[in-house]
Amino acid sequence: METDQEPYVRLATLRQLHQVMADMNTARSLPDTLQTVADGVVNGLGYELACVNLVRADGDLVVAAFAGNSAAEALITGRVGSRDSWERRLAMGETWGELVFIPHTEGWVLDDDDVPQWYTDGPAPRFEDEWHPSDRLFAPMFTPSVPGGTCGELIGVLSVDRPRNGRRPGAWGKEALQMYAFQAAIAISNSRLRANMQRALVRLEREQQALRASEESFRQAFEYAPSGMAIAEMGGDQHGRILRTNDALCRLLGRPASAMRRYSFSDLVHPEDIGTLLRTSAEGGRTELRLARRDGSYLWVSLRNSVVADTTDGPRFLLTHVEDIEERKRRELQLAHRASHDSLTGLPNSAELRARLSSRLCQRSQTAAPGLVESVDAAYEHGQVDPYGTHDQYTTAPVPVTDGGLQPYDVSGHQFDFSATPEAYGAYDHHVHTVAPEGEQDDGTKGLAVLFCDLDGFKSINDRFGHNAGDAVLIEVARRLGGAVRDGDTVARLGGDEFVVLADGLGRADAQDLAVRLRNEIIQPIRVDGRAMRVGASFGIGWAHCGMTADEVLKSADERMYIEKRSRPKQHRRAG
């Protein structure tokens, strides 16, 4: 998976991980959760075999779930391996973060221990990172611990085998498996906790005499739960007011229990997430939102509701389970950023550039006959902007990503679909159509300029001083381009030494002036390791308008760049 396209593979894998993790947390029982964990490794992480070894009360580990091979499942499911043998395995081999990898060259000493295992054979690896059938990879699972503390108690071990790509996992594969084991441990702990709570609730309903014992059992499960929990009023004027919280929730939000009783969750939720909270069902509802900490910061949590009763016919209360997902959200944002931005310069990459450009275009031709569309467009018109004033017509924020993929929005924030049909351009088309200046003279029309930049003389820098120097030049050029445009403009790197600038609200003269200014920024000397280096730049100016695709717009600008490059003498294509 370590390829130029790795960020896109990662994003697809992340979607699969979301689904299998959701399945883990919605399983009805502990056996279902364990089997879902094993199935998730096969379906979401790209391994052919997966085994969940669960720690029993006596400390030994039993094969509780298996996925990928029915024959192997029948052979080892339910068999037990001693704790000593497992600890020996986890102390061997190579440590990959929380993972343990035992290569086939070392694992032969384990063939005769009492840990249940399947046997596969095959030829010796042909290259260094090829997976051998006798390689072993383990992902220990620990109970959730206090943030910043050490790992909790070992509750099980994930054993995986046969990566589908035939290679040992790379950096992303290791991180994904480690993150999955962490989430699986939470799901198993929560499943056990839910089972305990359900048993307590059954006793509350069936046995009045055992009420005190059941209450104590519930209290302990509540107070000592590894994740935050709260009990709130349900119904009436005080609906949602927090009555009781456990220590884990108080630590999570940095608030004492006495202060928590003055709030409801609607008082603590981020203003942008109020709607999400209100849409969450009281019975079995679950959602992800941000809660306010005492220091004013906000924390991402997973919130799950259930209903409990004080007695059989007594008042009902809302039991809310709050789980810290800040780290997962941070990883999601990092992965999303990696998928849409160039790893070297930090600029939007080719895919992100095309997404932003496509969000401004629809399939309606610029030469379409005027009608009701233009009238509605005029009603939503923002007016012309000063070429380099402070009023931007579009934002540099990434196009929102939904479950269905990229979903474009126009400058007014109206959602639209650019898979055009005749009905798509009726009297209620709120899309502000992108137009382009016509002819070679500046007629005063303002449009979306696409400046295609190709560096001149960059190859000689790579050849003479090496790729590290070339990378430093690219980073500095990216910085200069970003500093020379408006906040609302987009600077993207297509790859190699090619950059693209999207600048809205420009006429032809404005675009030419911008190209000159950007070229003057680029040709200034760049110091790398004490050397002054210079590169030139050739610019081609294209214009985007509705009826074109993003690729057509970029191709037009690229062709104009090569015309401009060929029109200058070779000796003038470099800055010196």
Image: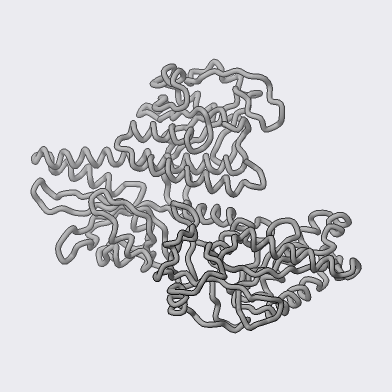
Q: Position of residue 337 (x, y in %)?
A: 57, 57
The residue shown at (24%, 61%) is: 242
Based on the displayed image, in which of its 4 quarters is residue 112 positioned?
top right
Name the one closer to the observer, 282 or 202: 282
The residue shown at (25%, 67%) is: 262
* Position above or below: 250 against 485: above
**Image check: 225 left or right of 48?**
left
Name the one closer to the observer, 6 or 150: 6
Name the one closer to the observer, 484 or 437: 437
Based on the displayed image, in which of its 4 quarters is residue 78 positioned?
top left
Name the one closer to the observer, 417 or 415: 417
Q: Position of residue 156 (x, y in %)?
A: 43, 33
The residue shown at (40%, 71%) is: 427
**Image check: 495 left or right of 80?**
right
**Image check: 391 left or right of 233?**
right
**Image check: 292 left or right of 447?**
left
Q: Quadrant of the C terminus?
A: bottom right
The answer to whether residue 395 of the structure is visible from this angle is: no
